[in-house]
Image: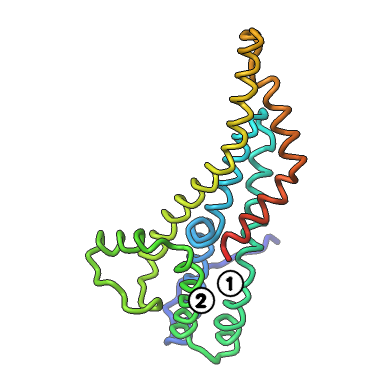
Amino acid sequence: MLPQVTINFAEAQGAEQVVPALKILLLMTVLSLAPAILISMTAFTRIVIVLSFVRQAIGAQNVPPMQVVMVLSLLLTAVVMAPVAQRLDAEALEPYTHKQLDEKAAFDRASNIVRDFLVPQTREADLRLFYELSKTPSPKTQHDVALHLLVAAFMISELRTGFEMGFLVFLPFILIDLIVASILTAMGMVMLPPTMLATPLKLLLFVLVDGWGLLSRSLVTSFG
């Protein structure tokens, strides 16, 4: 005899049945927005931009693979965001699960913890820009900053910072390209592509100075 599955859409009996359903719906919504939260409210954007610049500056053919760059970006993001996650767990999630805080109080406390991370990384000019665009009065304190405006300002601040760091990382590799091209031109070897000699030199320089270690340290400490 085949089993049967029956789905009933019965009317909820009171708030005790409605509230858990709403909590599940809210949880599913947050999980679906997890990639957007990762990109817009963590250190991921700056890290992946800088690592992508390094990958392009080295000039090797698709080395390291983009998958490796993404995984390294995620791991470095986890290192940077670990203190924030620990605060969220200790000050918002655990009190809420132990029924010491209601939903609103837990959300407010979590929002303030997120603001404590975002505000120092956000340029004041960028935050002012979005307040002017939204025609919203300026906040009086850090905890009065609107979270949606703060996240937008944080994003463009991270893009600017990532490009600045990427430019500084790019310079030594450009110098190697220029030096190799000048030497080949002076020797009359104009038919030899400079990248054939520049790429091994760039790889050698990057390995000798422990480039990945220095880059990881710089990226993590830049959020200090």
Classify residue 163 as left or right of residue 152.
right
Q: Do the residues labelled 1 and 2 touch (CB within 8 Å)?
A: yes
Classify residue 130 as left or right of residue 205.
left
Give above or below for 172 relative to 21.
above
Classify residue 148 as left or right of residue 21.
left
| Residue sitting nearer the eye, 36 or 3 | 36
Image point (24%, 72%), residue name: 137
Please name the residue that numbered disc 1 is placed on. Answer: 84
How far across and how far down the image is residue 165, in percent? Answer: 54, 48
| Secondary structure of residue under mark 2 | helix
| Amino acid type of the residue tagged 2 in the rendering | Ile
User: Going from the N terminus, do you reach mark 1 or mark 2 first?
Assistant: 1
How far across and how far down the image is residue 146, in percent? Answer: 35, 71
Where residue 113 is drawn, which disc sits there? 2
Image point (51%, 60%), residue name: 32
The quarter of the picture where the C terminus appears is bottom right
Distance in Å between CA atoms under marks 1 and 2: 7 Å
| Secondary structure of residue under mark 1 | helix
The quarter of the picture where the N terminus appears is bottom right
Residue furthest toward the bottom? 100
| Disc 2 crowd, CA 10 A, few/some/many (<14, 14-19, 20+) | some
